[in-house]
Image (tube, rainbow, N blue to C red):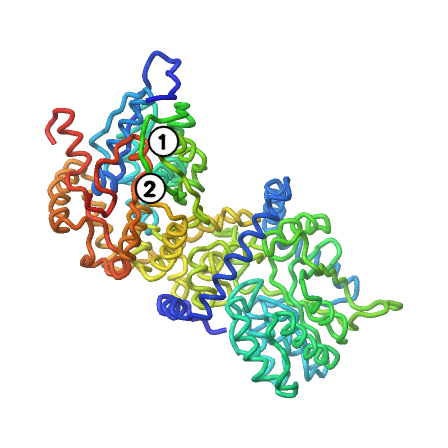
Amino acid sequence: MAGTAEPTDAKRPRVGLFVTCLVDLMRPSVGFAAVKLLEAAGCEVEVPRAQTCCGQPAYNAGDRETAALLARQTIEALESFDYVVAPSGSCAGMLKRHYPELFHKDDPFRERATGLAKKVYELVSFLVDVRAMTSVAARLSGKATYHDSCSGLRELGIRAQPRKLLATVAGLELVEMAEPEACCGFGGTFAVKYGEISNAICEQKTARISATGCDLLLAGDLGCLINIAGKLSREGRPIAVRHVAEVLAGMTGTAPIGGTK
Amino acid sequence: MKPTAHTFPANATKALADPNLQIALGKLRTNYVGAIAAARARLPEFETLRDEARDIKNHVLAHLDLYLEEFERKVTEVGGVVHWASTHAEARALILDICRKAGAKTVTKGKSMISEEIALNDHLAANGIEPVETDLGEYLIQIRNEPPSHIIGPAVHLTREQVEADFRRLHTHLPKGRSLGEATELVAEARGILRERFLAADVGITGANFLIAETGTTVIVTNEGNGDLTQTLPKTHIVLASIEKVVPTLEDVSTILRVLARSATGQEISTYTTFSTGPRRPGDPDGPEQFHVVLLDGGRSEILGTEYRDILRCIRCGACMDHCPVYHAVGGHAYGWVYPGPIGAALNPALIGLEEAGHLPNASTFCGRCEEVCPMRIPLPRIMRFWREKQFALGRTGAPAKRAMRLWAWFARRPALYHLGARIAMPLLRLAARGRGRFHKLPQMGGWTDHRDFPAPEGSTFQAQWAKRRGGLP
């Protein structure tokens, strides 16, 4: 893959891929795109079997105890790697920003959580900020717009990195929608518990997406993508939805999210 | 006001179906968000000022008793009187008493959220004293008998057409054919009506954005000048404020003012910033003869020392609601009590109880934009999460939701079993979509599928495919 600075260290960093439960269950293609990108960036990728979910659904539901149990499991599975990378700003944010808060300061897991947090990155920001990737070899003709997922944007500062790499995808025109930083209304269980409000928020998002005239919506978080894809298809808007990693890895052979071909 | 926060979902349904409200909310989004961002961007030291403002309030909250006592001492020195009210009822009684002693028939009022909190207008009216709101937005909701829907723009839920219709209905002494098509004409008409009321008022009641301990001064920030007329024309001025409004010095107020207007309206500074120190002195050209400050606790001292004490730093700018996707969708009334939006979701459970306000901290996507724009750096999502944890611990999280969460967690904590289950379930789910790539309906997921399709999974899980690729057993 072009534009990747060769690691100065002869040793390839060992990256533990935190697949995330949504990618594992719903859209494995995103995981394989992440592996391809990480390998292109000179990393040795491993996927520990002992991972499932980061525990964020429990954490946001007020079930701190369950969240802490899942955090322990995830920390044990991932702490031995040089880096831990997730194709999701939301899950990476959970590991990086919230895990340390889950443990009392006397709990030995507090220190282990803090240690893990330092090594955790969201995929695209890892490629750009840590691996100094400046371009990708992918090609895709079309007009895309990028939605800034809330956790990635506000917890991890991801805004420029995906745009920087997308700008190097041959044939792809990137158009900004109005208020790309506005929430899509997903919010985990919020989308079901307060479905009507969630839907109203999402309608505003899809209207702004549609106004760009693009044929492809991209984002870095599967939660938002599933929500937006579901709304776009219900509204009958012919806009394909994909995770940004699929496009950056040049792996757009699979059907878009919620699509058939 | 009687809270209706417990019916939040029904309130929200009503709000989403209200076309006037939806038009008004659309305008709020376009008007405030850009102006606030521009004002912040114009001030390079804005982020530093946020830190300073946060630190000032944190210091005050750590020494609240000392600063309140100093404030009282200074107010007394300059000839004013401080009254302490621990409850809403006490505050109402104190104010009624002052009004009665002043022989008041009419009371003019500047904008005050604490007045809304203690439902002062109803109490005065029930006791034969007419309250007249003089802030334009407050005047509008008073004539409509509605609560405010926004902290700084109480009537942001109304369209110009609705206001025109109300004015034509109520101001019947004015010519029927008058032009009211422009916002400026509506403002002029309200001003004309309120001017007569200012002159007739016996008591003026204002809120306070700040109470300054070192000088005994109260400060209000307004854009209409109504606050000045409210407090200088009548013989008695009552300031109604909650205890966390105190700051140590004039210098501190100057710092916080620099983040307040920028975060509230996108102005560098509001049109009027009025400092009141005691009653009229001999030789003063104007000012009230009596100066009273009613300080409300209303549950705030119990917030000190809790994990959510940061909410007491709030300066009521409204930026959190201006940027909140949920507020944008349903407006302020749906929240069902005085403080809407993210600050309401964080504060109301403390003030009116978690039983009543339980929905509010749950009705958030945790997008984090409120915390990002809060000039006082209040960690609003963290406080909402605190309330969710409290509800979970109290067993108030709905039983089916809790069971589903625990069942899912039971599997998630057994990776081998989880992966096996997922390897079997996902391809079946894929088949169930029957080649359409998405579901139009799913059991237990009506909240989602009533409005949106649910994309079907690709089939085989990542872990299963990865294991195969690595030649191992799935």
- Going from N to C along the chain, the mark reached first, 2 or 1, is 1
Outermost residue toward the top in this view = A10
Compared to residue B131, the image places residue B254 above or below, namely above
Q: Indicate the position of residue A178 as horizontal and vertical percent values.
A: 46, 49
Q: Nearer the viewer, residue B106 or B321?
A: B321
Could you say which disc has been placed on residue B166 in the image?
Answer: none
Question: Which corner quadrant holds the C terminus of chain B?
Answer: top left
In the rendered structure, which amino acid carries the disc numbered 2? Asp
Compared to residue A232, the image places residue A135 above or below, namely above
Chain of the residue that carries numbered disc 1 in the rendered image: A
Q: Residue at x 58, y 56 (%)?
A: B317
Q: Indicate the position of residue B293 as horizontal and vertical percent values.
A: 68, 67
Marks 1 and 2: in contact by CB < 8 Å?
A: no
Residue A103 in view (yes/no): no
In the rendered structure, which amino acid carries the disc numbered 1? Val
Could you say which disc has been placed on residue A221 in the image?
Answer: 2
- Left or right position of B352 against B197: left
Image-quadrant location for residue B286: bottom right
Secondary structure beneath disc 1? loop
Q: Indicate the position of residue B100 as horizontal and vertical percent values.
A: 68, 82
Residue A5 in view (yes/no): yes
Please tell me how crowded label 1 is: few (under 14), some (14-19), or many (20+) other residues with Cα within 10 Å: many
Could you confirm whether marks 2 and 1 are on the same chain?
yes
Please tell me how crowded label 2 is: few (under 14), some (14-19), or many (20+) other residues with Cα within 10 Å: many
Secondary structure beneath disc 2? loop
Eye-nearest disc, 2 or 1: 1
What residue does disc 1 label?
Answer: A169
Q: Indicate the position of residue B19 as horizontal and vertical percent values.
A: 43, 70
Image-quadrant location for residue B231: bottom right
